[in-house]
Each structure stands twice: as structure tokens, then as C-alpha cells.
Amino acid sequence: MKVIYAGSFDPVTYGHLDIILRARKVFGEVIVAVLNNKKKTGFFTISERLALLEKALEGEENIEIDSFEGLLVDYANRKNIGTVVRGLRSNSDFENEYMVAMANKNYGTDLETVFLLTTQEHLFISSSLAREVAIFGGDTSLFVPEIVGKAMKEKVRER
């Protein structure tokens, strides 16, 4: 069974990678779908995020990297996939994700959402925290793979 794990991945973190690999273990195949939200200016461009995901997941089988614009329900419909995976770190994550899952379900689709709980070692990791640490010149190795950390430092130097 193939599922979608969608997000901004700006940048991809160890928490994201953990959810991707665990989702593949449970479902067999995962499409990692990077949302191209034209209303937001990201830290990395969409093409940079896709490249970093490819590098971070190099050698991993049954994982497809893709991007999309618009609604996740429409993307899932185009891909003919009926299940999305979301990672949960906290109660507030659950409240937000539950509302989105219910909206997706009631959008006239049969899109199911499966929640995977973040492992204890990744509870504190977020893309926004990783970006903040990088902007202030800190060590990003707790949050992101080395290849991503190097790209973050380069991006900060460019600004």
C-alpha cells in the first residue's frame, strides 16, 4: 500500500525522516510530498527541499519524492492514494491535525489520515527551531542530517 506524507520540509529534520521510514515499514511505500505554498516564502526553495530530501533518503527504497500545490485531497486524488500519514509530537499537534483530517474526510473524499507518534528522541525537533538555530550560527546536528545542516549554513551566509 502506498501512502502520502505531506509537509513543507523546510528543512527536512530527523523527525521527518523517522516518520518517513516508519511509515514505509508499516505501509510499504511512501510518497514524500513537499507542499509548494505560494503564499509563503520558505527558507529553502521547493527545488532545494526536494534535492535535500533526495540526498537525506539516498539509497532508501520505496520512497518517492514529489511536490504539489493546492489541496492535499486533490493531490491524493490525482495520485489515486487514499491514505495520508501525519506525525504527532504533542497535544496541540493532535488538535490541529485532527481538524485538518476531518476537513479532508468531509471534503467529499474518502481520504484517511493515520497518525504516527513521534519517538521520544525527536519530540523537541521542529523545522522552525532548526532554522532559528542555523540563523544564529548554532549547531544544527541535533535537528537535521549533516547535508541539510551544511545547506542551512550556506543559505544563512547568502542572506
Image: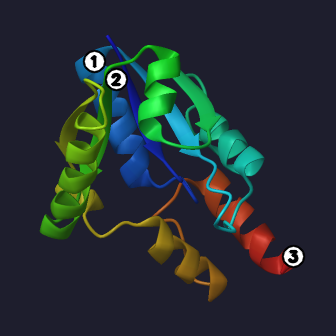
Q: Residue at x 21, y 55 (%)?
A: 99
- Foreground pick, 125 / 111: 111
- Foreground pick, 47 / 102: 102
Q: Residue at x 33, y 41 (%)?
A: 19
Residue 97: image quadrant is: bottom left
Mark 1 in CB contact with mark 2 (< 8 angstroms): yes
> In the rendered structure, which amino acid carries the disc numbered 3?
Glu
Which residue in the structure is indicated by mark 3? 158
Q: Residue at x 50, y 17 (%)?
A: 79
- Foreground pick, 27 / 134: 27
> In the rendered structure, which amino acid carries the disc numbered 1?
Phe
Measure the C-alpha gap from mark 1 to mark 2: 5 Å
Q: Is residue 27 left or right of residue 12?
A: left
Helix, strand or loop status at disc 2? helix
Quadrant in which the C terminus is drawn: bottom right
Measure the C-alpha gap from mark 3 to mark 2: 35 Å
Q: Is residue 60 visible?
A: no
Q: Residues within 10 Å of mark 2 (few under 14, many from 20)?
A: many
Which residue in the structure is indicated by mark 2? 24
| Residue farthest to the left, as pictured | 91
